[in-house]
Image (spheres, rainbow, N blue to C red):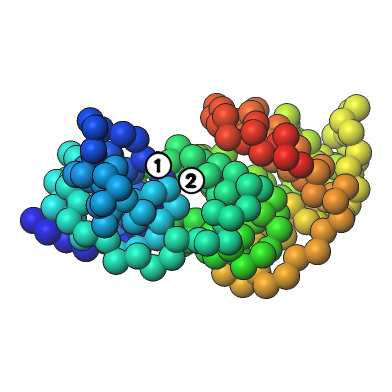
Amino acid sequence: MIIEVEGIVLSESPYGETSKIINILSKEKGLIGIMCKGAKSMKSSLRASTQILTYGIFSIYYKEGKLSTLKNVDVKNMWKEIHSDLTKISFATYLCELISQVVKQTDEDVFDFLLQSLIKIENGLDPLIITNVLELKCLPLLGVGLNLDECIRCGNKTQIVTIDASYGGLICKNCYQNEPILDKKIIQLIRMYYYVDIASINKINVDDKYKKIIDKFITDYYESFTGLYLQSKKFIENLL
């Protein structure tokens, strides 16, 4: 049957000489693999509208659990500013790779998280901050959400002295051993990143030294608790 889904292209791969397969994150059906016949051809109207990051309404011959076939695309946004900037496109590509690993079933929140993140990066907000916010939003979906309300060891809600990625959260004065002491501002920012509504972000000013520490904390947390290794994250770390 033919259906229409609102979606974002997460990846594309060639198929034969003139076709390609794309994977989209749809709001209605989650991840969908789609055959795009002739989309590699220079004359094809589908060539541009099936590239990575394209946001639009996809009309498809839908086959649940199998490869669907693309009929046409009503493009909503191709993210001109993102595609024109190496740093922005690198962060956006990483977010697509991350979401591909996170989504296991239909989840409208995840779709909205990604869409709002792309909107913010397109509109000039700091791509590292937006990326870190989305990374933190993904943790509960991976079953390893952060507890930012109490000591990870004893449950004490007071006298918090630091936060540690390898142990998975806050550490109070009584449980502190030899972990690095992080500025309380770092803990406040991580908490804000974790709970903020991405759509509500209009302006965020964070000192560069704080941004680097927060990004390292999140990267270390992912390595310690998620089992994910995303090559595109290593690439953007070289851009910082």
Give the labeled residue for mark 2: 96
Give the labeled residue for mark 1: 11
Residue that appears at 91% across and 27% down: 178
Quarter where residue 239 is shown: top right
Task: State the residue in front, 72 or 105.
Answer: 72
Q: Quadrant of the C terminus?
A: top right
Secondary structure state at the residue bearing disc 2:
helix
**Rendered location of residue 136, percent (x, y):** 62, 48
Secondary structure state at the residue bearing disc 1:
strand
**Rendered location of residue 149, percent (x, y):** 72, 52
Tag nearer the camera, 1 or 2: 1
Q: Is residue 125 left or right of residue 30?
A: right
Q: Amino acid at mark 2?
A: Cys
Residue that appears at 23% across and 38% down: 18
The residue carrying pointer 1 sits among few (fewer than 14), some (14 to 19) or many (20 or more) residues within 10 Å by Cα, namely many
| Label disc, if present, on residue 94 of the rendered structure | none
Quarter where residue 235 is shown: top right
Task: State the residue in front, 84 or 144.
Answer: 84
Q: Is residue 80 left or right of residue 178?
A: left
Q: Is residue 94 left or right of residue 194?
A: left
Number of labelled discs? 2
Residue that appears at 58% across and 35% down: 232
Q: Amino acid at mark 1?
A: Ser
**Disc 1 + disc 2, Cβ < 8 Å:** yes
Could you tell me if residue 218 is visible in this image? Answer: yes
**Rendered location of residue 99, percent (x, y):** 47, 45
Spatial CA span between label 1 and label 2: 8 Å
Q: Quadrant of the N terminus?
A: bottom left
Residue that appears at 19% across and 44% down: 37
